[in-house]
Image: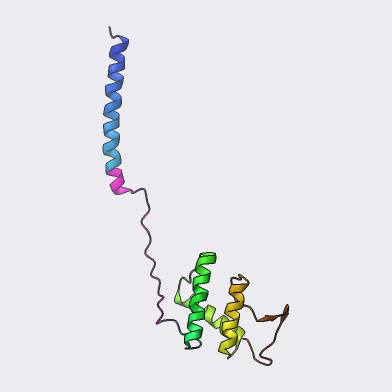
Amino acid sequence: MKTKQNYSKEILETLLRIEEELIKFNEHTALLYPLTKPKRSVTKTKSRDEIVMPWNDVEFINAWDTWRLYKKNTFKFTYKTSISEQEALATLRKIAGPNIKTAIKVIQQSISNQWQGFFPIKDNGQDTNLFEGVSYQ
């Protein structure tokens, strides 16, 4: 007849065997199914060479770099593709018209007002129409 001590010993041995088997199983499945999902490789086609600046001026390029840094630090936003960055530049060009100084002011206004995008220059709360007759299409 088995005593309580014998049952306890058998249970303990059984538990140790199960634990060893689980460790082996986990090691095997960890190789097959890692806990962390592998990151998908997304090809981001974005380099400075692919971006066509509306103005090739050092002052404008510095303002644009400041804008990108502001967006990254404030909103944790980066342009994911060269296409999205190019479209943001096109929007800025539409708002500023042909004037590089206006474009820089638009960037500065957006940063100083903590905006996420570009808007026409405001003067005393009024929109100023700097480019009458210019089509923004």
Residue 2 lies in what quarter of the image?
top left
x 40%, y 77%: residue: 47
Q: Percent from the top left, x then y, of residue 100?
A: 56, 88
Residue 81 lies in what quarter of the image?
bottom left
Relative side of 111 to 51, left or right: right
In the rendered image, the quadrant that contains the C terminus is: bottom right
Nearer the observer, 48 or 105: 105
Q: Residue furthest bottom?
A: 133
- 110 above or below 104? above
Q: Percent from the top left, x then y, of residue 96?
A: 60, 86
Relative side of 18 to 136, left or right: left
Q: Percent from the top left, x then y, of residue 71?
A: 53, 70
Q: Percent from the top left, x then y, of residue 112?
A: 61, 73
x 50%, y 88%: residue: 55
- 121 above or below 71? below
Q: Which residues are magenta?
A: 28-49
x 41%, y 80%: residue: 48
Nearer the observer, 110 or 4: 110
Residue 124 lies in what quarter of the image?
bottom right
Residue 40 part of the magenta-drawn span: yes
x 40%, y 74%: residue: 45
Colour scheme in use: rainbow
Q: Total marks drawn?
A: 0
In the rendered image, the quadrant that contains the N terminus is: top left
Nearer the observer, 81 or 70: 70
Residue 39 part of the magenta-drawn span: yes
Q: What secondary structure characterizes most of the magenta part?
A: loop
Q: Residue furthest top?
A: 1
- 53 above or below 15? below
